Amino acid sequence: MSRQQRLILVFLAAANLLLFLVFGLAVFYTSRLERQASVQPPTATPTIPPVLPPTWTPVPTPTPYVPPTPAPRSLTNEETGLLQKTAEQVVQLRGLEFRNSAPCWVLSKRQLLARTRARAPEPETTEGSAYALMALGWIQRRTELDRIVQCVMTEIAGYYETREKAVYLISDGEISGAMAKLVLAHELTHALQDQHFDLERLLLGGDEVTITSFPLDQEQASRALIEGDASLLTAQYLQSLPEEEIWTYVQEVWQLPSSCLENISPHLREMWYFPYTYGTQFVNFLYERGGWAEVNAAYGSPPVSTEQILHPERYLAGDVPRTVPSVDLSGVLKESWKPVFGGTVGEFALRLFLGEWLVEPLVLSATRGWGGDALTVYVDERGQTLLILHTVWDTPEDAGEFREALESSASARYGSPPVEVGEAELCWAGSEEYCLSWRDDAVVMVKGPERSLVLSVVRAVLQR
């Protein structure tokens, strides 16, 4: 293992300080939900030093954005010096120049919590995601999401705000030390990315779909490119520090308290770690092929699935997901059933779903032939959920391998073998009815309150 690879691992060991910078935080309260606020921005603007040419004006966002309260504090002279030096090193390492100044502010932890509460979306905007997570069994009740947000807010070290084009550092004291330098390097890399590649374009995709706390497949892939880029640069920045500073950083890492994220659903934790862990591996793959030029080129043709992040060779080969057609269930479901969530969740989410009950080698083998999927969740007036997972695979053999893994995981989940209820139809009974069916390269799984309803949906999706 090379020195650079060891430093990357050391950096990732402290990922809880960086995991929810701007895009981890966006899981709940940024990006598309940041359309409405009610206060004026700060009057003074401490910026990256004038050695960086201010020759570019950011493209306006589709709707006006006004930063929320409370107002942050400006950098001290010493902090400004640290910012300047770090910015110069980031520019040298990343090979991109700042086209415009990037303001940098400091928020206390109390101020960050106040901002978070002020920007919290209305409950109905995250309701669908909560129902999806409950239907998957990844959370027990919606209020768990609120608890997780509060957990995140106690650990965040900084973030880059795409709407304000500004870096925010979170501290109750002075910004100093090796850890602060790494946070700055990470966030300044996001500023460079934004100025050269337009981060909002990557994350929003030009649509107005409400962001949820359950990131969908393409969003995860975009975030993996962005965070993997910043994480690899930060590891290189760490490598450029004097040896004594590196060991100071290592000591700071080992002195960190246990993360409260260790107590949340492991599925959600792994989903949120994904852009940093697998994203860094993906970007490093590109970097080893052609340096930062190869990484820059990826922004012109960004990855579109977690499959491409997990298997970079498939990204280079242009292996894109297949579209899974929607199915009209109006003839099967009563009017009381309303769709609340829908989209492609991707190979990585399917790994997590199977991994709760199966060993990792089996999970990896069962999901490697992923071709596309559609997860849909319905809710009725009693709060009952109906989950529909429609997957397609590269070959019928890949579909068969996934189906066998699903069968094994379901038998482990419900503690009994399946009941054959029809040709290529298996069901399990527990707190809900769970049925599985397949045809050619497609596999469909449905969970719901009644077997007759579940089977009717399965047959409609496969058009039997």
Image: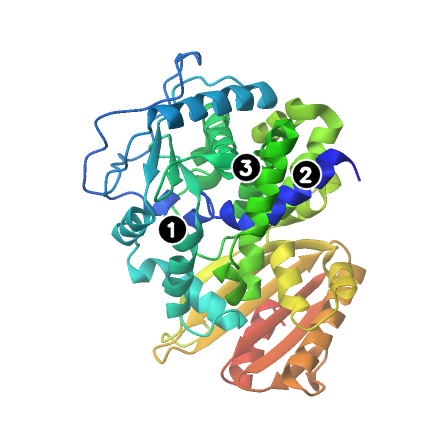
Q: Nearer the viewer, mark 2 or mark 1?
A: 2
Which of disc 1 and disc 2 is earlier in sequence?
A: 2
Do the residues under discs 2 and 3 have CB atoms within 8 angstroms?
A: no
Q: CA distance from mark 2 to mark 1?
A: 37 Å
Q: Quadrant of the N terminus?
A: top right
Could you tell me residue 264's position as x and y percent?
A: 50, 66
Q: Nearer the viewer, mark 1 or mark 3?
A: 3
Where does label 3 land, which residue? 226
Circle 3: element type: helix
**Coloration of the structure image:** rainbow
| Disc 1 crowd, CA 10 A, few/some/many (<14, 14-19, 20+) | few
Image-based side of 102 in relation to 372, left or right = left
Could you tell me residue 16's position as x and y percent?
A: 53, 51
Q: Disc number at residue 7?
A: 2
Q: Nearer the viewer, residue 441 or 404?
A: 404
Label 3 sits on what residue type?
Ile
Q: CA distance from mark 1 to mark 3?
A: 20 Å
